[in-house]
Structures are given as structure tokens and as C-alpha cells.
Image: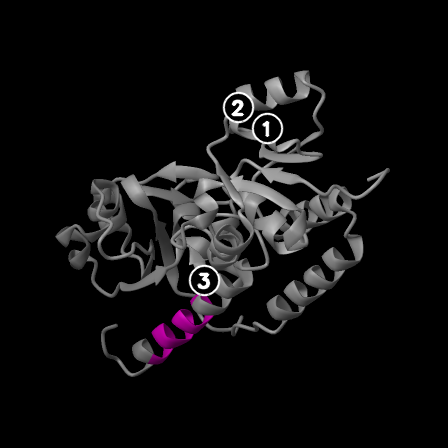
């Protein structure tokens, strides 16, 4: 964090895009990845689109030839993405900060603090984290009630267990992560047959915008899921949980309401 605050910040990763758009003054952002403009996965897509339309914000695809002409004084990237480009940029003497994906709430706080320190905005980070913690502490599911057993369904049948942000979101919202009971750690795969056999109470599904079909998402609407007796279906916008940020509190609130609705429905003896 030593030295002048960076004035030409570039991000090459969707998740670092979110932190830059959250923490940096608009005039200090030179470029974000093209994914930052997609509202399906980017929580700050509106801000990115406004900056592009009114201030000429560049969209990049993680290529060194796109970034070098921008003369950045700080570049942010994911630890596991655009690694060849990161190596080239460092070889040219550029300051590159890489961040691990957030696998829980502590990692969210840590990444916000790390990026804020690099930007010279530590006080702003503390305010954001304090508000994030306030929102999480306001969510108080009934710990004495039996939690609904939930399975996260992502494209291609992927799901998440302990060691993932989605797991922390589910548990904080008062849900039991059934994928963990089925042996999934981090990111894993559950065949359709095992999901039906497990009989979850809630299916938490990655939402998909109409008009943007894909086979990976279409599989989430397989009619066999209707065979799961009591399961309700909760569609959660990907922009809330694809990347770790204070928007994860929105996901917790949505799932806490879904759990409450499920309890009320089952208490009356009707099917969700």
C-alpha cells in the first residue's frame, strides 16, 4: 500500500471486477473484464455499463495486448485465471495483485481489505465490512427448528459442500447442506439419481435469464426432479454468489425467507 494511490486500475477477473467496482472511485478504473458487464453474473453490471457508456471504461478479455496500452498502475487478477497474462505483465514490471476465490465469509472480508489496502481505501473497506456483518447478524433463523435439507444445483449437475461460499450461505440462512452429508467437499458432482434418492426439502438452483438457453442450465429443469417428493425450488441469482462480496448477504436473506416459507408450508401439512 506504500506510495501514491493507483489511478489507472485494471481488473482481469469477474470477482476482482466486483471488488474494484465496489471500492475504487469511478475515475480510477481503466478496465474491467467483459464479464463485469453481464448482469447475470456481475452484481455491479449497471455500474460497469454506466462507466462504459459515459466514461469510456474498457472491457478486456485478459489479454496482455489489451492491458499494456492502458498504462495501468495496478492490475488485479484471479489466482487461477489468466496466468499467462499475469506472468507477461509482471515481466514488464507491472504491479499485479492476485486474489484467491472467496470460499467463505472470512475470505470475503479478507479480500475486501486486501483490495482496499492496494487502492488506498482501508476506511471504506471497514465501513463495507461493518455493514456486511450487521446484515448477517440480523438474520436469525430458528436454531431449535429442524432445518430444511437443501441441495445446491449448478450447471452440469455441480454442487457444493464444506469449503465453499455457497455452503456458508446455506448454513447462515438456517439450511442444512445435504450435499455435505452425501460426501461433497468444495465443488463436486451429484448424479441425478442420488439427488432423487436423498429427497431434499429444497433445491437451490442457479437462476438463468430467459432467452439465454444452454444445455448445462437446461439440465437443471429435468422432469425427473419432479419425483422429489417435498422439494421446493429456489432460484438464486448467480450474481449474488458466484463471487464473494457483500452481495452474499442478499443471498443469505433470500434463502432465510425460503426456509421460513418452507417451514410454514410444511407446518400446515401442504406440499411446497
Which image quadrant for residue 130? bottom right
- The mark nearer the N terminus, 1 or 3, is 1
In the rendered view, does 124 fall on the left or right side of 42? right
Q: Is residue 218 visible?
A: yes
In the rendered view, does 184 fall on the left or right side of 77? left
Q: CA distance from mark 1 to mark 2?
A: 7 Å
Residue on which the image places disc 1: 69
Residue on which the image places disc 3: 175
Q: How many marks?
A: 3
Residue at 36% in and 53% down: 151
Relative image position of residue 55 (x, y in whole percent): 56, 52
Relative image position of residue 113 (x, y in whole percent): 73, 49
- The mark nearer the N terminus, 3 or 2, is 2
Q: Label 2 neighbourhood size at 10 Å, few (<14), some (14-19), many (20+)?
A: few
Q: Main secondary structure of the magenta part?
A: helix
Q: Quadrant of the N terminus?
A: top right
The magenta stretch spans residue 45: no
Magenta range: 255-264
Residue on which the image places disc 2: 65
Residue at 19% in and 53% down: 221
In the rendered view, does 207 fall on the left or right side of 129? left
Q: In this rendering, which labeled residue sits more in front, label 1 or label 3?
A: 1
Camera-side residue of 9 and 55: 55
Task: Look at the numbered disc 1 and give the secondary structure of its residue.
Answer: helix
Amino acid at each position: 500500500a506504500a506510495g501514491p494511490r493507483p489511478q489507472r486500475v485494471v481488473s482481469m477477473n469477474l470477482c476482482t471486477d466486483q471488488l474494484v467496482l465496489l471500492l475504487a472511485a469511478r475515475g480510477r478504473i481503466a478496465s474491467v473484464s467483459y464479464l463485469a458487464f453481464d448482469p447475470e453474473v456481475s452484481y455491479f453490471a449497471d455500474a460497469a455499463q454506466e462507466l462504459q457508456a459515459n466514461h469510456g471504461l474498457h472491457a478486456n478479455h485478459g489479454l496482455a495486448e489489451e492491458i499494456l496500452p492502458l498504462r495501468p498502475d495496478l492490475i488485479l487478477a484471479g489466482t487461477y485465471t489468466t496466468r499467462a497474462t499475469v506472468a507477461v505483465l509482471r515481466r514488464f514490471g507491472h504491479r499485479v495483485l492476485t486474489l484467491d476465490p472467496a470460499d467463505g465469509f472470512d475470505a470475503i472480508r479478507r479480500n475486501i481489505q486486501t483490495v482496499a489496502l492496494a487502492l488506498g481505501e482501508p476506511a471504506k473497506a471497514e465501513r463495507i465490512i461493518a455493514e456486511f456483518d450487521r446484515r448477517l447478524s440480523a438474520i436469525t433463523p430458528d436454531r431449535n427448528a429442524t432445518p430444511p435439507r437443501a441441495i445446491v444445483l449448478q450447471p452440469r449437475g455441480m454442487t457444493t459442500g464444506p469449503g465453499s461460499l455457497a455452503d456458508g450461505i446455506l448454513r447462515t440462512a438456517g439450511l442444512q447442506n445435504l450435499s455435505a452429508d452425501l460426501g461433497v467437499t468444495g465443488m463436486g458432482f451429484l448424479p441425478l439419481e442420488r439427488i432423487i434418492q436423498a429427497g431434499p426439502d429444497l433445491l437451490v438452483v442457479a437462476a438463468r435469464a430467459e432467452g439465454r438457453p444452454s444445455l448445462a442450465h437446461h439440465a437443471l429443469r429435468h422432469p425427473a426432479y419432479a419425483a422429489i417428493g417435498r422439494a421446493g425450488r429456489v432460484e438464486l441469482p448467480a450474481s449474488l454468489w458466484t463471487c464473494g462480496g457483500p452481495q452474499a448477504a442478499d443471498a443469505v436473506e433470500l434463502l432465510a425467507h425460503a426456509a421460513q416459507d418452507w417451514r410454514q408450508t410444511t407446518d400446515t401439512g401442504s406440499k411446497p
